[in-house]
Image (tube, rainbow, N blue to C red):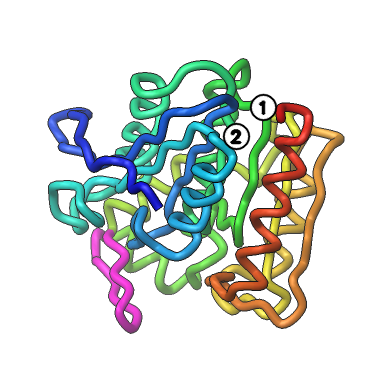
């Protein structure tokens, strides 16, 4: 595969790494999950898919992750959303199909709200909107609200990130998104309960929303047959634009 070159843009004083593949539209935009990056199995498989089709694609690393500069501990959902928005505004033209993995699905929903005229479709892979809300017990929320950072296993959640997420919740009212939305979720996802996918589906205003539940699938959805299911989903969205 011809790897798209690594490059950087400055967003709010932060140096953000990205890879952009030129090609026909709509541009595929991959948004990684929490503490993940643009070199994971799903992102690289999507890049190979884009190359085969001659499709334009953009992927990026949020500040403090992957090849981007900065400290992960300084990251907030608002900052990462700002970086993703700046990247699509400055690096792409025309229609977009957003592909968000886990937290990236939350960011993708916000981007669709902010740029409705450009986002033609959205794919959420184990999408995790509002996980700062449903993903923590009341006791843990109290600790975060007091400014305490939490570490659960290998995952760090800073008070700053949690507070930022609580200001960007989406699932409490109708989501004014009208484009086609495809949600791909693992039946046995222990990080993002399947109920969140159903809540997201019901909250979206769009009448063109489909949820594909993969039997036995966990949260990562990185097995070959799971990635194939994701790519088929995206290919079906692209068919009107061969």
Q: Is residue 54 above or below residue 65?
A: above
| Residue 224 in picture, x, y percent from top left | 60, 73
Crowd around label 2: few <14 · some 14–19 · many ≥20 (10 Å): many
Q: Is residue 76 above or below residue 101?
A: above
Q: Earlier in the sequence, mark 2 or mark 1?
A: 2
The quadrant of the rendering that contains the C terminus is top right
Residues marked 2 and 1 touching at CB (< 8 Å): yes
Question: Would residue 228 be found to the left or right of residue 152 on screen?
Answer: right
Task: Identify the residue position indicated by label 1 in the image.
Answer: 120
Can residue 234 be found in the magenta stretch? no
Can residue 148 be found in the magenta stretch? yes
| Residue 185 in picture, x, y percent from top left | 68, 65
Magenta residue span = 147-158
| Residue 1 in picture, x, y percent from top left | 40, 53
Q: Is residue 112 above or below residue 66?
A: above
Query: How many labels, in total?
Result: 2
Is disc 2 placed on a helix, strand or loop?
strand
In space, the residues marked 2 and 1 are separated at their CA atoms by 6 Å
Task: Identify the residue position indicated by label 2 in the image.
Answer: 97
Question: Would residue 138 be found to the left or right of residue 160 on screen?
Answer: right
Q: Is residue 75 visible?
A: yes
Is disc 1 placed on a helix, strand or loop?
strand
Residue under the point 42% across and 48% down = 165
Q: Dividing the picture into quarters, in which one does residue 128 lie? A: bottom right
Residue under the point 24% across and 56% down = 66
| Residue 98 in picture, x, y percent from top left | 56, 38
Q: Dividing the picture into quarters, in which one does residue 58 lie? A: top left
């Amino acid at each position: 595969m011809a790897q798209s070159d690594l490059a950087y843009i400055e967003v709010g004083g932060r140096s953000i790494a990205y890879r952009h593949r030129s090609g026909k539209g709509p541009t595929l935009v991959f948004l990684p999950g929490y503490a993940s990056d643009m070199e994971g199995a799903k992102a690289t498989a999507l890049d190979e898919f884009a190359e085969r089709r001659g499709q334009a694609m953009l992927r990026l690393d949020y500040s403090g992750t992957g090849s981007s500069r900065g400290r992960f501990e300084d990251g907030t959902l608002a900052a990462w959303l700002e970086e993703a928005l700046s990247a699509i505004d400055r690096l792409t033209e025309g229609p977009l199909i957003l592909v968000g993995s886990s937290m990236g699905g939350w960011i993708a929903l916000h981007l669709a709200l902010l740029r409705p005229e450009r986002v033609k479709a959205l794919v959420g892979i184990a999408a995790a909107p509002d996980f700062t809300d449903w993903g923590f017990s009341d006791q843990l929320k109290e600790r975060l609200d007091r400014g305490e950072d939490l570490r659960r296993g290998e995952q760090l959640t800073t008070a700053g990130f949690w507070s930022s997420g609580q200001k960007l919740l989406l699932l409490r009212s109708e989501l004014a998104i009208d484009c086609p939305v495809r949600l791909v979720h693992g039946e046995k996802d222990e990080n993002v309960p399947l109920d969140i996918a159903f809540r997201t589906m019901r909250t979206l205003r769009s009448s063109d929303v489909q949820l594909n539940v993969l039997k036995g699938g966990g949260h990562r959805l990185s097995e070959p047959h799971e990635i194939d299911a994701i790519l088929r989903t995206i290919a079906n969205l692209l068919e009107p634009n061969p």
